[in-house]
Structure formats: structure tokens, C-alpha cells
Image (cartoon, rainbow, N blue to C red):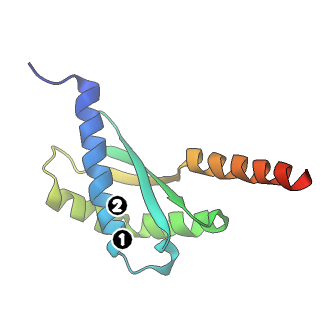
Amino acid sequence: MSPAPHDRMRRVNSIVRHILAGEVEMLKDPRLELVTITGVDTAPNLRSSVVYFSMLDLSDTEAARSALQSAAPRLRRALGRQVRMKYTPTLAFELDQGVARGDRIDGLLRGLTEEE
């Protein structure tokens, strides 16, 4: 019995996230010092992946996205070397909105407690 398609994609996403997280840690770009890869959403045809990232300082997300995008060819080569897939997906980077929303909610809650 073969695994369900969503289970297979979940496994692919997990493996891609793990590899990219390790590769991003090795990059020497100072714009990526506090960047964490939080998730990956790979297309079912394996041709593209959206890579979600978060960072401690949300004031400079565009610089981090730019640094990740410029490192995309290197990250993609590393992915191709470490994982055997039919295609090596192209990589697009997006800020993980869940983390950003959590930070915003946390700030609002802190503001409420300071007012009391």
C-alpha cells in the first residue's frame, strides 16, 4: 500500500525544510543571521517550492528575503545534491505570517498590560 499523496508531500516538505534550514545557517550573509526556515510548501509536480522564513527583528524582512533570493541558486544546488527527486524545485521565499501575527498580538497584549 502506497502512502497517501498528502503524506508524501508532507514528507517532501519536511525534508526540503530540514536541508534548507541547514544550508541557510552556513551562509555568511549578515542579513541572514537571525533567519529561521519555518516551513516549505512544495507544488505537487515538485517544480516549485515556497519557503517560509521568520526572523527575530521583523523590521528588515525585505533585506532578508532579498538575501535568500540571491542565495536561491546555491540553496537549490545543495538541495539537488542531497535529495533525489524527479525535479529540483525553484525556490521562492515568503515571510511566515503566523510568526509575524504572533509578534503583533504579543505586542498588543503587552500594551494592554502596561496601560493597567
- Specify the farthest residue to the right: 115
- Specify the farthest residue to the top: 1
Taking the image as drawn, is residue 54 in sight? yes
From the viewer's perspective, is residue 61 above or below residue 44? below
Taking the image as drawn, is residue 45 in sight? no
Examine the image and state in which quarter residue 91 appears: bottom left
Residue receiving disc 2: 21
85 or 39, which is in the foreground? Answer: 39
Q: Quadrant of the N terminus?
A: top left
Residue receiving disc 1: 25
**Residue 64 image label:** none
Percent across and percent down for residue 16 are 28, 51
Percent across and percent down for residue 21 are 34, 61
Q: What residue appears at the point 16 percent right and 46 percent down from the top-left corner?
A: 85
Q: Which kind of residue does numbered mark 1 sit on?
A: Glu
Q: What residue appears at the point 26 percent right and 58 percent down from the top-left corner?
A: 19
How much space separates mark 2 and mark 1, taking CA atoms?
A: 6 Å
Examine the image and state in which quarter residue 114 appears: bottom right
Q: What residue appears at the point 91 percent right and 53 percent down from the top-left corner?
A: 115
From the viewer's perspective, is residue 21 above or below residue 112? below
Q: Which kind of residue does numbered mark 2 sit on?
A: Ala
Q: Residues within 10 Å of mark 1 (few under 14, many from 20)?
A: some
